[in-house]
Amino acid sequence: MKSNLFNLKGLKYFLILWSTQGLSALGSAMTSFALVIWSYQQQGSALTTAGLTVCSYAPYVLLSIFAGSLADRWDKKKTMALCDLFAALTTAAVLILLKTGRLEIWHLYGINALNGLMNTIQQPAGEVAVTRLTPPEQVQRVAGLRSLSSSLVTLLSPVLAAAALTLLGLEAVIVFDLTTCAVAVGSLLLIRVPEGRAAEKDDLLQSAREGLGWLDQHRGVLDMILFLAAINLIASIYNAALPAMVLSRSGGGERALGILQTFTGIANLAGSLLVTLLPAPKSRVRVICNSLLFSMSTENLMLALGRRAGIWYTGAILGWLFIPVMNTNLDALLRLHIPVELQGRVYAARNTLQFFTIPVGYLLGGWLVDRVCEPYMAGLPAESALVRLLGGGKGSGAALLFLMIAAAGVLVCLIFRRDRNLWRLEEE
């Protein structure tokens, strides 16, 4: 009997798409990591650095609800290839500005916004392409493989980016990004994506209403999306505060941030391998809820209370170990419940509802660190309970914020675990 990991029957074209798009994602993640360090070194502000992600997500959130209709109408291969080519052009623009000594933060804001617009169009097309390239009996395995590639990107991008930055400079990171993008575009020529029945060319507002209407009639899926939206808000506050704390506290710095991201990737990789090898669970909803509860109740608390890098690294492992398990079961749950002919529109509506909290969380997290938590901790006497608990100096405000979002994350998970609409998904 073959192992689940190697039973890849019917996945030839998916594997080409998965591997090359994963390689391109690695290059993009390396560039993003390097530019976060560059921007924090330029400004020393969590809010300024968070603005990079806000600009990436703003068009994604605002326009995703309309992009699904385009994804259902347009050729999936051509859409993905054109979006990849546009992303390559914007990355090349960063390289030119850097080489001429003219790169500034506002340039990155504009470029990230353009990339976010292209990702808005590409993402639903890619989701539909994956569904059409996946036999029904391989849904769990494909979700696991996608989680595996995402984990590898998380694991390798900080290590490779830090090494390239140290040895070769930011330019080398960007050149690698451009190379991997070219590989992804070239591989699309080898793939045949079944297009299925062409979608009716109704207007974009009508398509948006169809996606939202389907969700309104399937409250279990809608409530699951709202659950993830709340988690994304907390996770985005975490992402905004993390560089400010690790780069500022004693025992931190660029090396510590890179190592922490590496441990995050190791945990993701271990979780992805686990979920790829295991059979589908009896209750996907239970797995999703419990995975998120474990994550929220461990890493944020250890980041808040830990004074040494080793504690932060342990928190990263515990916090991210079961995230691939959650993502895999969420991905499979959505694909099995949403009709394939509506997936572009429904996924687009999902993207708007589930991910609009990400830019809000980044802005809120950066503002809370710079304007609220850091000034508050700096004004406390050394003998106060919070200073004794969290430490003092720059970075202690971010630690206070981690303590707050640890409590918020647990509360959100406990509330949604009692949502009856989620559990009805198990009956359908």
Image (cartoon, rainbow, N blue to C red):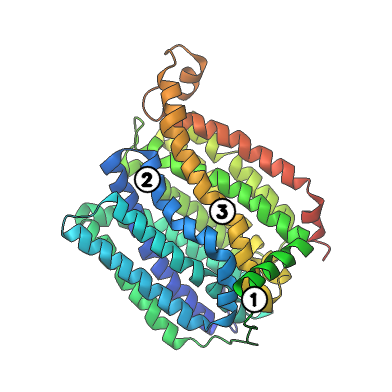
Label 1 SS: helix
Query: Closer to us: mark 1 or mark 3?
Result: 3
Residue 317: x, y in percent? Answer: 51, 46
- Amino acid type, residue under disc 1 in the picture: Gln
- Amino acid type, residue under disc 3 in the picture: Phe
Residue 60: x, y in percent? Answer: 50, 61
Query: Closer to us: mark 2 or mark 1?
Result: 2
Disc marking residue 49: 2
Image marks 3 and 2: residues in contact by CB distance under 8 Å:
no
Q: Is residue 36 left or right of residue 139?
A: left
Q: Nearer the viewer, residue 376 or 30?
A: 376
Q: Residues within 10 Å of mark 3 (few under 14, many from 20)?
A: many
Image marks 2 and 1: residues in contact by CB distance under 8 Å:
no
Please report the residue visible at 45 percent of the width from the left and 22 percent of the height from the top: 376
Residue 92's quadrant in the figure?
bottom left
58 shown above or below 77: above
Please report the residue visible at 39 percent of the width from the left and 30 percent of the height from the top: 395
Label 3 SS: loop
Residue 176: x, y in percent? Answer: 29, 67
- Which of pointers 2 and 1 lies earlier in the amino acid sequence? 2
Label 2 SS: helix
Disc marking residue 159: none
Q: Residues within 10 Å of mark 1 (few under 14, many from 20)?
A: some
Q: Which residue is mark 3?
A: 356
Kindly report the distance in space between the C-alpha atoms of the residues bearing marks 3 and 2: 18 Å
- Which of pointers 1 and 3 lies earlier in the amino acid sequence? 1
29 shown above or below 410: below
Q: Which residue is mark 1?
A: 138
Would residue 282 be seen by someone viewing this image from the given angle? no
Kindly report the distance in space between the C-alpha atoms of the residues bearing marks 1 and 3: 31 Å
